[in-house]
Amino acid sequence: MKKVLIPVVGTLGAGVIIISGMSTFAHKDNPFSASPPVNLASSGNDASATTSTPSVKTLGLVDIHYQLYHLDRLASNQIAIWIEDSQGNYVKTLRASSFTANGGYRTRPESLPEWREAANWENASENEIKRVSLPEQEPGMHVVYWDCTDESGQAVDPGTYVYKVEGNIFWENRVIYTGEIAVGSDFAGETKAKVEYKPADAESQGTLLENVSAGFKPGASIASAQQEPVTQTRGS
Amino acid sequence: MATFQIRAMNTSILTAGLSAEDAAQVFQWFRFIEAKFSRFLPASELSLVNGKAGEATKVSELFAHLVYESLHYFEETGGIFTPFLGKTLSGSGYGQSFEKVERENARTDDPVDNPTGFVEPIRFNLDLRTVNINDECLFDFGGIAKGWSAEQMAASLMKKGRKEGLIDAGGDIMSWKSGSSGEPWLIGIAHPYSDDKTIARLQLKEQAGVATSSVIKRSWKLDGRKMHHIIDPRTGLPAESDLVQATVIGRTLVPCEIYAKCLLILGSEQGPSWLRLRQPELAYILVDQQGRLSASLNIDQYLDEADLSKQITLDGS
């Protein structure tokens, strides 16, 4: 190993550290305080930073399952999962592929057009984009959860809701799964989604998604669900 | 699991498992730290200290704490970690916030020559709490400020009795769970070239810190030469080991942040044995330039899902 050009060290005896010789301080306790100042805690709630509101009492938890395949081709493997009410009004996006969610649709407008229109995604906030961005997933069965809140974090009313999963198979060739799920205190149950290809012959381009279904557990909270990794360590 | 997220310190800060009030406190802390330790804010305490290089300058208690902490690791690592690279980084073209650096054609007003001799980088008077930084060095706390901030805030929240929480400061993660508060935290290790891909999955029980360093993420070109922000203090130039990414896991975050960087500088041959001599309890996963993964023998306690025998594709896509 080459010699380190800036050798460490100094003396503590006189209370002065001069980094130039042999060290004596490295294993001593840091004499200075670093606790976060108390006044930080009382300087107000940074509500704009939040991406969800954990204290909301909701109806329960919807889990949406899907079988994902990987298509080894261009302009594919983008998916979005969102909720609408029974009248077709947008409620909330659960997850969307990172490329499209972060603006990839500007260079590839074929990416997830139905979801983008429903969610008015061109006007999504930065926090919303970060909340839903879905890193590339391995092929296999996956699950996402809806905690029965809308995009503002408020609990939705009991009733029937529509879950949708859109996927790009190859450029404009897409698959869309649509299913209904009833949420409310008496509505525990499971449903299967129906598949539609756009255009109709898109199915011949390959299989991206299958076996899309959902279940509702009254009273369950999202904290009780087995999650995907909450975040990732990465170089910065 | 409720998560909250903002941007600060030119990166993403995320909390999980914390109340909205605690998350807000975390975010305020990071903004406070950024205002104090940023190399790119003219009014930060760090900029003021660097601007008075050659003079004994009175510093805040917090600043003194981080200087001391940095010197601790400066010594422990034999100078492989150093907080005295401010001038070197600026002279390498990284003299402003990274999103403003022209990646293909960075510029510098003050190019650095390769260091050829020893300079005394600092005089630190503990009694008077003054710092005199050499103007050939200048402070850059870089990653240690992020990791240290997350660790300090996590300690504060644990002290207040929060049973669980996770603070992610741009990929430097501090998490804790105590008692019977549920399943371990699951976190991914990002692919060196794409945060959309994961090369392994970790489960973090009780208290854990995780940090990853990469030579890919903050890279640019200066006079046609490829540069990145992991500087080898032995040469004053971007590290040129066989590794592209190093992840280190331990009980606290700051050592992970420090040693991930050191492993990246030292490479796969020298780094692991060097680490074992200093911090044998730390676990690591390394990615070399061919995409091969390697890990410490004690990684099993943290691994949830990984195939360490595989070679990942490093095509930059």
Image: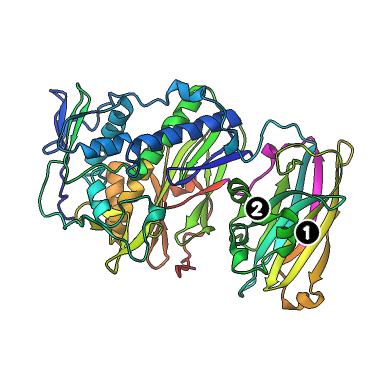
Q: How many numbered marks are there? A: 2
**Pick the front one: A98 or B249:** A98
Q: How is the image coloured?
A: rainbow
Give left or right: position of B20 versus B64: right
Q: Position of residue B62 (x, y in %)?
A: 33, 28
Name the secondary structure under disc 1: strand
Give left or right: position of B230 versus B188: left
Q: Which mark is residue A212?
A: 1
- Is residue A226 covered in magenta? yes
Q: Position of residue B220 (x, y in %)?
A: 35, 62
Asked which quadrant contains residue B280, the reply is top left
**Disc 1 residue type?**
Val
Chain letter for mark 1: A
Circles 1 and 2 on the same subunit: yes
The residue drawn where x is 30% and y is 26% is B60
**Disc 2 residue type?**
Asn
**Pick the front one: B51 or A50:** B51
Of discs 1 and 2, which sits in the foreground?
2
* Label 1 packing within 10 angstroms: few (<14), some (14-19), many (20+): many
State which tag comes first along the sequence, 1 or 2. Answer: 2
Q: Identify the residue under disc 2.
A: A123
- Is residue B57 covered in magenta? no
Asked which quadrant contains residue A207, the reply is bottom right
The residue drawn where x is 82% and y is 67% is A196
Give left or right: position of B89 versus A15: right
Question: In the rendered structure, which segment of residues is drawn in magenta?
Answer: A211-230
Q: Position of residue B215 (x, y in %)?
A: 36, 58
| Residue A193 visible in the picture | yes
**Can you say whether A37 is above or below B192 in the image?**
above
Indicate the quadrant containing the N terminus of chain B: top left, top right, bottom left or bottom right: top right
